[in-house]
Each structure stands twice: as C-alpha cells, then as structure tokens.
Amino acid sequence: MLTHLDSQGRANMVDVTDKAVTSREAVAQALVRMQPQTLQMIVSGGHPKGDVFAVARIAGIQAAKKTSDLIPLCHPLMLTSVKVELSAEGVDAVRIIARCKLAGQTGVEMEALTAASVAALTIYDMCKAVDRGMTIESVCLLEKRGGKSGHYQVTPA
C-alpha cells in the first residue's frame, strides 16, 4: 500500500499523530567510482580544494538535517545522531556509509539515503575538474530498525 496517497489517489503527508515514539535507526550507502589517480589524490591529502572526505562528511550531515526540505511529503525530524563514514574501497572507489538515529514516530531511511547521496555528490563536485567520468552507484538502504515494520537488513551477496 502506498501510504503517501489518499483514497482518491492524491498525494498527502502521512499522519503519524497516533504512532508510538520509538527508537529508530537507518543505515544507507553510496559508492563513488573514479580513476585510481583521483582516489590517490583524495587519500593522500593532495587535493587543491582541501580535505574531500571532511567536506563530504559535513555535506552528508547537513543533507540529512534538510531532508524534509528536499523530499516532498517527508516529515521534518529531530535527528539525535547523524554519522557519515567515508573510506577508500579498492583502488578506484569511495564507499560512503550514513547512519541516522532518533526517537520518533516515523523512520529515518530517507535521511540516511539523502546523507549518503549528498556526500557522494559532494565528492563528485570537489573532484570533477580532474575526473568528470566519476559515477555514483549502489545508493541503497542497508538496514533499518524500529517502528511497526521492525528490522530490515540487506543480505550480503
């Protein structure tokens, strides 16, 4: 059932007034593929714009906090924790893991996905002058906890 549609099929914000406040957490990822020399420049600290991981981490945190401004029908949430981790993956990629938490009436999946996506876009923005062929892929929800639907976790391949 699509909960963002009313009985006439019109878009509406889901009413969470009667939902219980529970502890909720979501983890999402994104992967940015690039030329090996681009990754080397990032991890060596040789990027002329500064610390790419630090800027991407801040962008991801800010994005999680602004999700309801970006995604129509999302509830504004009082996040209690946002963590964005970035790491080199192999010789040609950066893996981003975003984790959002709160005690609330609705989940934080969109906040975690937004954080991972915007962190990836920030890496692209900072590095596009040296590598326009970067790709952003594998943006997905890895895990969610809390709420009526319970625990969800991606099964590793």
Image (cartoon, rainbow, N blue to C red):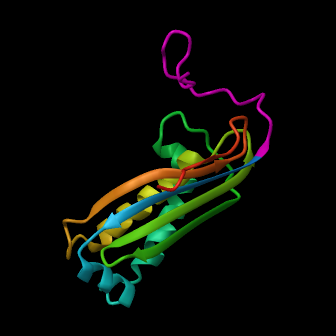
Q: Is residue 3 magenta?
A: yes
The one of 150 and 42 positioned closer to us in this rendering: 150
- Specify the quadrant that holds the N terminus: top right
Q: Quadrant of residue 41?
A: bottom left
- The span picked out in magenta is 1-22
Q: Is residue 85 magenta?
A: no
Q: What is the x, y in percent for residue 129?
A: 20, 73
Q: What is the x, y in percent for residue 62?
A: 53, 61
> In the visual, does 61 lie left or right of 145?
left
The outermost residue toward the front is: 157
Q: Residue at x 31, y 85 (%)?
A: 40
Q: What is the x, y in percent for residue 85?
A: 53, 70
The one of 97 and 103 positioned closer to us in this rendering: 97
The one of 88 and 51 positioned closer to us in this rendering: 88
> In the visual, does 120 lie left or right of 61?
left
Number of dots carrying numbers: 0
The outermost residue toward the top is: 8
Q: What is the x, y in percent for residue 50?
A: 37, 84
Q: Is residue 47 visible?
A: no
Q: Residue at x 51, y 69 (%)?
A: 58
Q: Is residue 149 visible?
A: yes
Q: Residue at x 75, y 29 (%)?
A: 17
> In the visual, does 135 lie left or right of 71?
left
Q: Main secondary structure of the magenta part?
A: loop
The one of 122 and 98 positioned closer to us in this rendering: 98
